[in-house]
Image: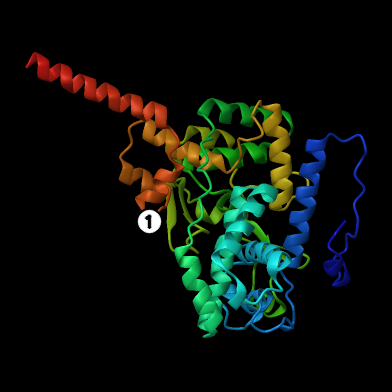
Amino acid sequence: MADEKLVAKGYPTKTVRIPSDMPPEGIAARCQILQQEMLEWAGGFAPSKNSAVPGTLEWVCRAFETDTDSPYHDRRQATRVFYSKYIRTLVDTAGHMHLANILGRDVRRWHKDWSASTGERSAYACIQTLRRVVSYGCELRNADAIELAAVLERTEFPMPRKRKHRPTFEQIVALRRAAHAADRPSIALAVALQFELGLRQKDVIGEWVRPTPAERAAITGAITDGVWVWQWGLTWNHINAEQLLEKPTSKSNGREVAAHDLRLHPEILAELPARGVGPVVIDERSKLPWKATHFSHTFRKIARAAGWPDDLWNMDSRAGAVSEAFEAGADATDVMRTATHTQMSTTMIYNRGGVVQSSRVAELRAARRKGREQG
């Protein structure tokens, strides 16, 4: 069942019937897709005014979402949807509480409850969102927000455990074969681009956003589907005649450019179709760029057919690229630049090849000791 408030605003899908014989994991996956589609649709809507009680947590949350000068509006639509998702959790949890009455131990209790109900990553996202909205309250010179921000600064919460999963080259090959068997060569191409070049999914398949009427009027020459506009994906304009790929990255808002000579990547050339116009990766059914939720659902079915465990995700392909590079002995600075990171610490988060690399260090240390003994 869709959110009643969004249905009242015009969301077209009120209920969806799910077969009773569908396995629990299938039901969970379908519901997650439906929820994300609803949130994407809702990304274009926000309360017209802040009617919450001044000084409450809900009030500062709504101010962050609706004030014209809030930094909320400087973010991409996908980021705004992300913020609003966790703002709803904050409001549902303690929107009625006045900022002056919120103690650090309250927030610790919320974090513990969120971790138990939605997982440690979502719980940490709630904490970070709380810090953002309270920080905006500081910009409004609200004394209670300023005091609560100081409390939050001194209150520590455990970071989510770093992901350890990454696909191997052999798993990528198996998935590409499964994609072709399913008559989905675009999935094979997308995965090859992510794993070989370390690109993010968004920089390969792009994203569909719902701009405001004013934003829509300023957009020309874009690929559209009704009220939706496609952006950030890989297009043939990013690949020149010499097979040099230069793609501004979405994470940096175009400031960083991923540059690769595709002639050095036979795995990509094997998947790359004949040169065309517009998006490189196209949904075979719709003949349009993939919608993120549909891509995720289709990818998971193919990944299972290829033998991937469910806890190995498409987003891990980027970590696989970085890890394989380090395992091959690539220079750390080169790996960082390949991944278009601006800090080495970020690159190391994606480095998940600990055993291979620690073994190489052990071999080098043993060789040095042997050389000293012989010398």
In the image, residue 87 sits, relative to residue 198, either above or below, namely below
Question: Residue at the spot x=11%, y=20% of the render?
Answer: 372
Q: Is residue 19 left or right of residue 132?
A: right
- Visible residue check, residue 25: yes
177 displayed left or right of 252: right
**Residue position for label 1:** 342
Percent x, y of residue 129: 58, 65
Residue 229 coordinates in the image, percent (x, y) = 69, 65
**SS under mark 1:** loop
288 vs 354, left or right, is: right
Residue 16 x, y percent position in the rendering: 90, 51
Q: Quadrant of the N terminus?
A: bottom right
Q: Nearer the viewer, residue 248 or 322?
A: 322
| Front position in the image: 111 or 167 | 111
Residue 115 or 80: which is nearer the viewer? Answer: 115
Q: Residue furthest left?
A: 375
Classify mark 1: residues with Cα within 10 Å, few (<14), some (14-19) or many (20+). Answer: few
Q: What amino acid is at disc 1?
A: Thr
Q: Residue at x 65, y 39 (%)?
A: 187
Which corner quadrant of the image does residue 178 belong to?
top right
- Eyeballing the image, is 166 above or below 336? above
The colour style of the image is rainbow
Locate residue 213 relative to residue 24 in the image: left or right: left
Quarter residue 88 falls in: bottom right
Q: Work out whether residue 233 can be spotted.
A: no
Q: In the rendered view of the protein, which quadrant contains the C terminus?
A: top left
Q: Residue at x 35, y 49 (%)?
A: 344
Residue furthest out toward the top: 374
